[in-house]
Image (spheres, rainbow, N blue to C red):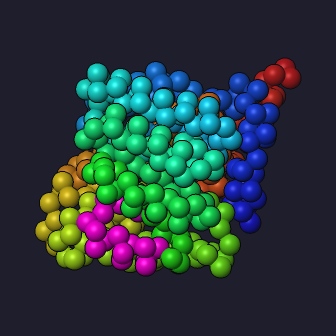
């Protein structure tokens, strides 16, 4: 219920604008978001790559309502890609189609994504998967872009009932896919309501991505999860089938389970950390609170402490 309530709140950006006025909110948000500027993100990316990790970056924002906002988001990605190349970073951008104008028209979003893909050249660009009303359009755009661009990759969410069929179809095309559990508020008609079922489905889909058929088709799976049990199961499965370390990777979010980084690297597997940045952090931040109730408790404790300090 708490998850549901938070996910409802995550779609109310006006609340975020209110919260952002409190300096304390910003300090708590910093746990999950590198900062508001590209410079903040670049510093975090350099630190992670310096520690031997792979990196991805996302410029926060979603559901833009004007063509100017969509163009500006694409501009930020293009400039970021140039700057990352200049600094020798091998970071892969990860973007939301609604940030690049999908709500204003598919052609507009495609135009902007293509600008980013062209600028990124041989660097992979991930199309994040958003709430279920966007899944068909996102997959259609992925297929359309794949015909022309080899550096585009997509994301699938294990909590949706439809994902097994989507995966089966994409596997045949040698896809590059990030498998995540899914972070949005979905009705039981579309997604498994129980976490145990989502976890079970994740393991099944991971098995499909590691199957002989998927590997023969050239699949490069990225397993985006902080779930230690699943990570162990997948890493063991990959070892058992003799899959080389460079044929798959794990992915995690900045600020979530950094304690696992060293252990995973010690096992010789590839680990990529996704660094988010930007002023529009609200939806992303509240989804992180929803994933783990303890985060909300931490946020409220910090807020109460800050309030008490201010009253003194
Ligand atoms: P799960 O929720 O089962 O938690 C397992 C453990 O991980 C917890 O016990 C805790 O220790 C830790 N943990 C997980 N979340 C935490 C948090 N917020 N704070 C602190 N600890 C936490 N979703 C989506 O719908 N579309 C997308 O495009 C993406 N993209 C994406 C990229 C990357 C790189 C990652 C890692 C994740 C996404 N996601 C996503 C989010 C994903 O769907 C999912 O909501 C989160 O990863 C949480 O699920 P887990 O599998 O990590 O574990």
Instruction: Residue 282: say if magenta.
Output: no
Residue at 48%, 52% in the rendered image: 128
Query: Observer-nearest residue: 26 or 257?
Result: 26
Q: Quadrant of the C terminus?
A: top right
Quadrant in the rendering for residue 141: bottom left
Q: Is residue 256 left or right of residue 175?
A: right
Instruction: Residue 164: say if magenta.
Output: yes
Quadrant in the rendering for residue 300: top right
The residue at the far right in this view is: 311
Residue at 70%, 32% in the rendered image: 25
The residue at the far front in this view is: 107
Quadrant in the rendering for residue 134: bottom right
Numbered label tally: 0
Q: Which residues are magenta?
A: 163-181
Query: Observer-nearest residue: 146 or 99?
Result: 146
Q: Where is residue 58 drawn, in percent x and y?
A: 47, 39
Residue at 31%, 57% in the rendered image: 147
Q: Is residue 38 visible?
A: yes
Q: Where is residue 202 drawn, in percent x and y?
A: 43, 71
């Amino acid at each position: 219920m708490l998850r549901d309530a938070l996910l409802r709140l995550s779609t109310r950006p006006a609340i975020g604008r209110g919260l952002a006025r409190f300096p304390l909110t910003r300090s708590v948000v910093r746990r999950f978001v590198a900062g508001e500027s590209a410079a903040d993100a670049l510093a975090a990316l350099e630190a992670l790559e310096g520690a031997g990790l792979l990196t991805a970056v996302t410029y926060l924002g979603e559901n833009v309502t004007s063509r100017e906002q969509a163009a500006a988001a694409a501009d930020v990605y293009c400039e970021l890609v140039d700057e990352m190349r200049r600094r020798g970073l091998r970071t892969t951008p990860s973007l939301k189609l609604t940030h690049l104008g999908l709500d204003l028209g598919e052609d507009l979003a495609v135009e902007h994504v293509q600008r980013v893909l062209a600028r990124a050249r041989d660097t992979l660009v991930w199309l994040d998967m958003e709430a279920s009303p966007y899944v068909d359009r996102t997959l259609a755009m992925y297929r359309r872009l794949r015909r022309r661009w080899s550096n585009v990759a997509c994301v699938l969410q294990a909590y949706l009932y439809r994902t097994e069929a989507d995966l089966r179809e994409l596997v045949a095309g040698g896809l590059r896919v990030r498998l995540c559990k899914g972070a949005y508020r979905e009705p039981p008609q579309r997604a498994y309501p129980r976490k145990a079922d989502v976890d079970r489905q994740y393991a099944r889909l991971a098995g499909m991505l590691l199957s002989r058929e998927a590997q023969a088709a050239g699949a490069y799976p990225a397993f985006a999860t902080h779930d230690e049990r699943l990570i162990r199961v997948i890493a063991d499965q990959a070892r058992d089938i003799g899959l080389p370390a460079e044929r798959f990777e794990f992915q995690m979010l900045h600020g979530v389970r950094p304690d696992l980084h060293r252990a995973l690297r010690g096992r010789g597997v590839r680990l990529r950390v996704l660094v988010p940045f930007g002023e529009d952090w609200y939806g992303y931040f509240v989804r992180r609170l929803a994933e783990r109730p303890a985060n909300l408790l931490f946020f409220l404790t910090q807020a109460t402490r800050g309030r008490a300090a201010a009253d003194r």
